[in-house]
Image: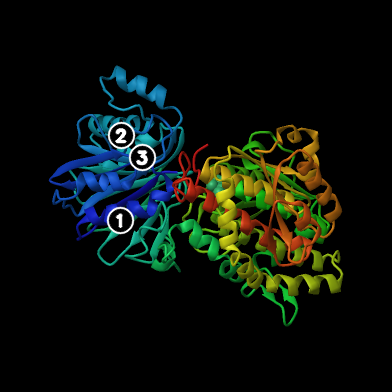
C-alpha cells in the first residue's frame, strides 16, 4: 500500500531515495517524505506526489549516506504534510516509516499519553515510534531491542524501517503481513517494499519473512532475527531476473498503455515452455506433483480480489468446462471471515498479481490451516503469497506498474487455461481432438492480440463518443460475463465514470430501467454458443434507445446492423474469447481516461497493492 525505501552505504542517499520513491509511487501517492541522517536527523515531507517532495528538497544540497523514504496511501489520518511519513519520536532522536495498520494504536496512544508523550499527527505510525522511544529510554536498549520489545506489544500489520540519530551506521527493518525486501550491493544495503527501487543497484535480495527483524550495519552487513527472539537466522539470498527497461515507460505515454500493448508478448511468455503446439502438449511444472489430488478434489475454491477475482470467474468457467471439477469463486475478503467449510479434500487457488494483497494472503493462510491444498497464481516473483502456498505457477508478465491491471489479467486467464487443459486431459474430461484444437488455438492467441491492438484508432474514436457520459453498462454472457465486469472496473477506476457489469440476460431483471438515449451499453457479443440470445439482448437495449457499442467477431453481419458501433476481434473458440475481448475494453477505458485528463497510471484513492484490510 505504501512504499518504503531505505539506504545505507557510501553514496549520497538523497537521489537514491528520491528515485526509489518514484519507482514505488504506484504503491501509494497521497504524500511522500524522506529522512536523512548526517549529524542531524532531518525529515522533509509533503502532501501529494513524489514530485512535490522533489520540488521541496531540490537545490538544498542534501547529503547523507544513510536515509529512508516513504510514499503513502493514507489509512489513519488524512493525507497532509503532518500525517506524511517519516515520523519522529518525541525526542526527535528516532524516525520511522511504516506500511500497514497498528490496530491497537488507540490503547497504546492512551498509555503513552499518560506517560507524557505528545503526538503531532493522527497516525498510528507516530504511536509506534513513541513506543520504541519509550523502551529505548526506559530500558536503555539498543535500537533493535527497543524495536523488538515495541513490536511485541503491537497488534496489526506492518513493514517498518527505523533510524536512530545516535547510530548513523544502522537501519532496523521489520515486517508482519507486509512485504520487505533487503538489497545487498557491494558497498550498499537497501530495504524496500519491493525490488523495483533496488534493481538498478543490485539483483541480490533477501525477502524478509513474517515477524523477522533485519539489522543493517556498515560493519556486519545484514543480520536477521525474529520479533520473538534475537537468535540469528541464515539469510537466503535470491538473484532477481528483472531488467531496468521493464520499469520504464519505453516511449509510451503511460505504463498502462505500454502494458496493454505488451500483452501479445506477455501471453507468449506465460505459455513459454508450458505449451508446445507442434508436438501438441501442455505442462505446468508446479501442478505436476499435485495433479492427482487436484483432479480428485471435492471442489476447487478460487479466492482473489478485484481484477484477479474476475480472472477467477473465468477460471471457474474454464475448469468446470474443460476439466469437469466443481469450482466456487470467493472474494478473498469475504472468504477469510465467513468460517467456510474446508477439508483436505478441497483445493484453494489464490490469484494475485502482486502476491501481497492482504485479504488474499489471509484467505490462503486460512485454507492452509484447514488442511486444503493451496495453489498460487501470482505475478510478482518471491512475493508473500508465492512463498507461502504449497505450490503454484507464476504468470511471468514482468512488473505491472499501472495501477489498473491489464497484462496480469490476460496472464492469469492464460495460466488458468493451461491449468484446465492439463487437468482435463489428465482426468479424461477432454476429448483428444478438442484438447489439440484448444492447444493450437491458444498458441495463435498472441498473433490475434496484435490484430485487436490494431483497432486502437477506432477504439479511440469511440472513447470520444462516450467520454462525457456519467454512466455505462457492460453486458456479456458466458465467458464474456466476467469480461463485462472487468471492462466496467477498468472504466470506473481510471476515468471515474460509473460503470456496471452484468450478465446480459440479467439486464431485464433491473438495470434495463436505467437505459435511455444517454446510456452507452457496451456489449461483448462474440459468443459462438449464445449468439442469438445476445442479439436479443442488444435489441432490448436498442428498443429503449440505448447507445450500443458491441465487441463482435470479425465478419459479423447481424449485430453490425443493429448496434451503433462495433469493434471487431478475430474469431476464436469460446473458452479463449476473454483473452481477446478484454483488450478493446482496456483500450476504451484508457482513451476515455486520457480524454478526461485523469491520472491514468495513478488514479485517485487507489494503490497498486492493497496490503491492508
Ligand atoms: O495484486 P492483486 O491481484 O491481488 O490485486 C487485486 C486488486 O487489488 C487489483 O486487481 C485491483 O482491483 C486493480 N486496481 C484492478 O485494476
Between marks 3 and 2 in the image, the one whose residue lies nearer the viewer: 2
Of the numbered discs 2 and 1, the one sitting upstream in the chain is 1
Quadrant of image for the N terminus: top left
| Residue that label 1 marks | 19
Between marks 1 and 3 in the image, the one whose residue lies nearer the viewer: 1
Instruction: Locate residue 425: give its quadrant.
Output: bottom right
Image coordinates of residue 312 in percent, x first then y, are 68, 51
Mark 3 residue crowding within 10 angstroms, few (<14) / some (14–19) / many (20+): many
Side of 10 relative to 391 (left or right)? left
Mark 2 residue crowding within 10 angstroms, few (<14) / some (14–19) / many (20+): many
How far, Cα to Cα, is label 1 from label 3? 30 Å
Q: Residue extending furthest top?
A: 114
Q: Which mark is residue 129?
A: 2
Side of 199 relative to 535 (left or right)? left
The foreground one among 207 and 417 is 417
Q: From this viewpoint, is residue 38 visible?
A: yes
As drawn, 36 above or below 584: above
Q: Residue at x 76, y 66 (%)?
A: 555
As drawn, 134 above or below 376: above
Q: Residue at x 63, y 38 (%)?
A: 336
Q: Which mark is residue 148?
A: 3
Q: Secondary structure at mark 1?
A: helix
Side of 496 relative to 570 (left or right)? left
Image coordinates of residue 19 in percent, x first then y, are 30, 56
Q: Secondary structure at mark 3?
A: helix
Instruction: Locate residue 249: give its quadrant.
Output: bottom left
Side of 533 relative to 581 (left or right)? right
Q: From this viewpoint, is residue 390 visible?
A: no
The foreground one among 53 and 422 is 53
- Pointers 2 and 1 in contact (C-beta within 8 Å): no
Q: Secondary structure at mark 2?
A: helix
Amino acid at each position: 500500500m505504501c512504499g518504503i525505501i531505505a539506504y545505507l552505504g557510501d553514496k549520497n542517499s538523497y537521489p537514491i531515495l528520491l528515485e526509489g520513491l518514484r519507482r514505488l509511487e504506484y504503491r501509494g501517492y497521497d504524500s511522500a517524505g524522506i529522512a536523512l541522517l548526517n549529524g542531524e536527523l532531518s525529515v522533509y515531507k509533503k502532501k501529494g506526489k513524489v514530485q512535490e517532495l522533489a520540488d521541496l528538497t531540490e537545490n538544498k544540497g542534501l547529503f547523507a549516506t544513510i536515509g529512508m523514504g516513504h510514499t503513502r496511501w493514507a489509512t489513519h489520518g488524512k493525507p497532509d504534510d503532518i500525517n506524511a511519513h517519516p515520523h519522529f519520536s518525541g525526542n526527535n532522536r528516532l524516525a520511522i516509516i511504516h506500511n500497514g495498520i497498528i490496530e491497537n494504536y488507540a490503547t497504546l496512544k492512551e498509555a503513552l499519553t499518560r506517560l507524557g508523550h505528545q503526538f503531532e499527527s493522527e497516525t498510528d505510525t507516530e504511536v509506534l515510534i513513541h513506543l520504541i522511544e519509550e523502551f529505548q529510554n526506559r530500558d536503555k536498549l539498543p535500537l533493535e531491542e527497543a524495536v523488538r520489545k515495541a513490536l511485541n506489544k503491537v497488534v496489526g500489520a506492518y513493514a517498518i524501517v527505523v533510524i536512530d540519530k545516535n547510530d548513523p551506521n544502522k537501519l532496523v527493518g521489520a515486517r508482519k503481513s507486509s512485504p520487505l525486501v533487503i538489497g545487498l550491493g557491494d558497498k550498499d544495503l537497501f530495504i524496500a517494499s519491493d525490488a523495483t527501487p533496488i534493481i538498478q543497484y543490485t539483483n541480490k535480495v533477501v525477502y524478509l519473512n513474517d515477524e523477522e527483524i533485519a539489522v543493517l550495519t556498515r560493519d556486519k552487513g545484514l543480520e536477521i532475527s525474529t520479533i520473538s527472539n534475537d537468535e540469528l537466522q541464515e539469510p537466503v539470498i535470491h538473484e532477481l531476473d528483472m531488467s531496468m527497461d521493464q520499469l520504464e515507460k519505453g516511449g509510451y505515454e503511460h505504463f498502462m498503455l505500454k502494458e496493454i500493448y505488451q500483452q501479445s508478448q506477455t501471453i507468449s511468455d506465460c505459455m513459454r515452455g508450458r505449451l508446445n503446439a507442434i508436438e501438441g502438449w501442455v505442462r505446468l511444472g508446479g501442478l505436476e506433483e499435485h495433479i492427482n489430488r487436484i483432479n480428485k478434489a471435492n471442489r476447487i475454491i478460487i479466492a482473489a480480489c478485484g481484477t484477479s477475482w474476475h480472472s477467477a470467474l473465468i477460471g471457474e468457467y474454464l475448469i468446470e468446462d474443460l476439466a469437469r471439477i466443481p469450482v466456487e469463486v470467493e472474494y478473498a475478503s469475504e472468504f477469510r471471515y465467513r468460517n467456510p467449510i474446508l477439508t483436505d479434500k478441497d483445493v484453494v487457488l489464490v490469484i494475485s498479481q502482486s502476491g501481497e494483497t492482504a485479504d488474499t494472503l489471509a484467505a490462503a493462510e486460512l485454507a492452509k490451516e484447514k488442511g486444503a491444498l493451496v495453489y498460487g497464481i501470482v505475478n510478482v516473483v518471491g512475493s508473500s503469497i508465492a512463498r507461502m502456498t504449497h505450490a503454484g505457477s507464476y504468470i511471468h508478465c514482468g512488473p505491472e506498474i499501472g495501477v489498473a491491471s491489464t497484462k496480469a489479467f490476460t496472464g492469469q486467464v492464460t495460466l488458468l487455461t493451461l491449468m484446465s487443459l492439463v487437468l482435463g486431459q489428465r482426468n479424461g474430461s477432454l476429448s483428444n481432438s478438442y484438447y489439440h484444437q484448444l492447444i493450437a488455438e491458444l498458441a495463435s492467441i498472441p498473433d490475434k492480440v496484435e490484430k485487436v491492438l490494431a483497432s486502437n484508432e477506432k477504439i479511440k474514436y469511440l472513447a470520444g463518443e462516450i467520454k462525457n457520459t456519467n454512466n455505462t453498462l457492460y453486458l456479456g454472457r458466458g465467458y464474456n460475463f466476467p469480461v463485462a465486469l472487468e471492462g466496467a472496473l477498468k472504466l470506473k477506476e481510471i476515468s471515474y465514470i460509473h460503470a456496471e457489469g452484468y450478465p446480459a440476460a440479467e439486464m431485464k431483471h433491473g438495470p434495463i430501467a436505467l437505459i435511455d438515449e444517454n446510456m452507452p451499453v457496451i456489449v461483448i457479443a462474440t459468443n459462438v454458443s449464445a449468439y442469438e440470445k445476445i442479439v436479443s439482448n442488444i435489441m432490448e437495449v436498442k428498443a429503449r434507445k440505448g447507445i450500443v457499442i458491441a465487441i463482435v467477431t470479425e465478419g459479423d453481419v447481424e449485430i453490425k446492423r443493429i448496434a451503433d458501433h462495433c469493434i471487431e476481434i478475430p474469431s476464436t473458440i469460446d473458452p479463449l474469447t476473454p483473452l481477446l475481448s478484454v483488450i478493446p475494453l482496456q483500450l476504451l477505458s484508457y482513451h476515455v481516461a486520457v480524454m478526461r485528463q485523469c491520472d491514468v497510471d495513478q488514479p485517485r484513492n487507489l494503490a497498486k497493492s492493497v496490503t491492508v484490510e
